[in-house]
Structures are given as C-alpha cells and as structure tokens.
Amino acid sequence: MDVSLKKVCVDFMTKFFALAAHVGLLPPPGHSFWARVAHELASAIGKGIYAPGERLPSEHDLAEIHGVNRHTIRRSLSSLGQMGLVRSTKGSGTFVEELAVDLVLGKRTRHQHSLAQAGVKGGLQLLSTTRERADAGTARALALRVGSAVLHLVVLGDGDGQALHVSDRYFPLPRFAGLDVHLQETASITQSFARLGVADYTRQASRISACLPRAEVADHLSQASTRPVLQVTSVNVDAIGIPIEYARTWFAGDRVTLTVEHAHAG
C-alpha cells in the first residue's frame, strides 16, 4: 500500500539564524542584550507566537516583556529587519514578514502545479541562455563526459508578481536543442519537455542547504545579499532513468517554505 507523507524537510528558521550567527549578522544570545532579545523574538516567530504578517508589540511593550530598554529593542529589530524577518513601517509599527508560498518538492515537482496548490499564479521566465561545455560537476550529474555540450538556462520563477526563486539549469545537447525557445513560449519546463518528446519525468535527487546568495542571485530575487536563501540542487530523469536536467535553484527564504513529499511503500 502506498502512503503519501508530507514532511517539512527544512526548518528554515533554525538554519536562517544559525547562518546569520555564522556570518556575524546575529551573534549568539550571550553576546549582548540586543542579541538575546533578537533570538527570543526569532524563537517566538518560529513557534508561531507572532504569525507572518502580524504586528509586533510596540517598542515600549517589548522592552517591558524582555526586561531591556527601548534602544536595545530597536537594535534587535534592526538586526532582524536586515535579515528579512521583520519589516518596520513608519507610523504603523513592525510586522513579521509573510512566508507567502509553501512549495512542494516531490517525485514529480512542477512549478505551476506547486503554485496552484498554494493558491498562487505564476510561471517561469527565461533570463539567459548559453551553450556550454559541461564541467566535472555538471557532467557527473547528467551522466555525460566532461566537456560534453549542454544548454545552460538561467530561469526566474515568480508567484503573484514576486520573485520566488532563480535557477541555473543544464540540459544535455543535442537532445534538448531548442528547449529555450519552447520555454519562452510556454513559461513551463514540463510543457517544453513535452514538445521535445519527454512526456513524463521524475526527480532523482534533491539536496537542500541554506546559504548567502551571490550578488547576481540576490539581484534577481530583489533582496539584500545579507538575507539567506535556500539552495536546492536537483537532478531530473526521464521515464527510463536517463538524466535530462541538472539544476541549482535559490529560493527567497523570506517568501518561500519548502515541503518534501515522500512516497513510502507499506
């Protein structure tokens, strides 16, 4: 009997603040009063005490809650704002940033289908296309010889008008010559594959990690380079198991949560 199990594979809040501490954006709680308060607020947000989109208590109230002065609270909120966890609006207060979209990574991950499940409209936009020679990593992922011809696409995924992820995608040539043209016309990798004779494909593997984005990735995602992203490295294969796509995708961490969908045989 097959059972579909949805499991949140990345506790982004934990990785987010661990990475922030590592790069010096947020020191450990024992570093100072403001760092302690920042961690306490982060923990409260992670536990849902302060929900996405919710207004935080005033600086005066937070100072009383955490036993510090308002200057300390301002420093704590400023650090969380730099990392994209909260936003301050003059005259309105400070709000928890909204985690807008929960995307599913499954055996048959499809961008538009994941958005539809989340009640969001969007598609894929081709940013650039080049023909390259596969380096060692790309060749290994696609089961090719080093130096084999590949099609390299840089693709932006959006949802309701905001950038959710950007990716480097590699496809073996000559099998997928013209896929870039089809992607421009369909805004869908799945439909582009179908036009080239691949009716179905599955995800062979995914690796997820948190990191700070390169400048060009941050620019594509319209975010500061100090805000961590989730990087997903994946390989897709056709119906007989031949690799057809190798991708490195960077998800905007303050706009996306990732869920991995597992199928277990019982």
Image (cartoon, grey):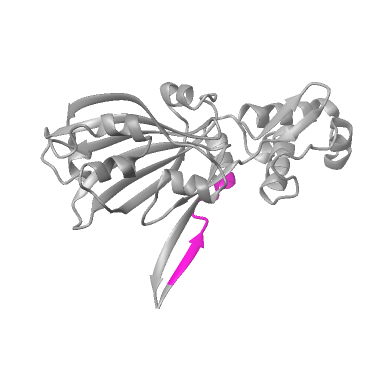
- The answer to which quarter of the image holds residue 156 is top left
Q: Residue at x 29, y 47 (%)?
A: 235
The image position of residue 265, as x and y in percent, is 37, 74
- Within the image, what quadrant is residue 101 found in? top right
Residue 245, position in %: x, y?
26, 43
Q: Is residue 210 above or below residue 185?
A: below
Q: Nearer the viewer, residue 110 or 130?
A: 110
Locate residue 91, reporting x and y percent.
83, 22
Picture quarter with the C terminus:
bottom left
- In terms of depth relative to the viewer, which is nearer, 61 or 164? 164
Relative to residue 100, is residue 241 depicted above or below? Answer: below
Task: State which region is magenta.
Answer: 3-14
Residue under the image location 42 percent in, 46 percent down = 208
Q: Is residue 206 magenta?
A: no
Indicate the quadrant containing the N terminus: top left, top right, bottom left or bottom right.
bottom left
Does residue 147 appear to the left or right of 80 in the view shown? left
Q: Which of 42 and 143 lies nearest the eye of the viewer? A: 143
- Does 10 lie within the magenta span? yes
Q: Quadrant of residue 108?
A: bottom left
Left or right, 225 with reference to 194: right
**Residue 32, placed above or below residue 112:** above
Is residue 23 toward the left or the right of residue 30 in the image? Answer: left
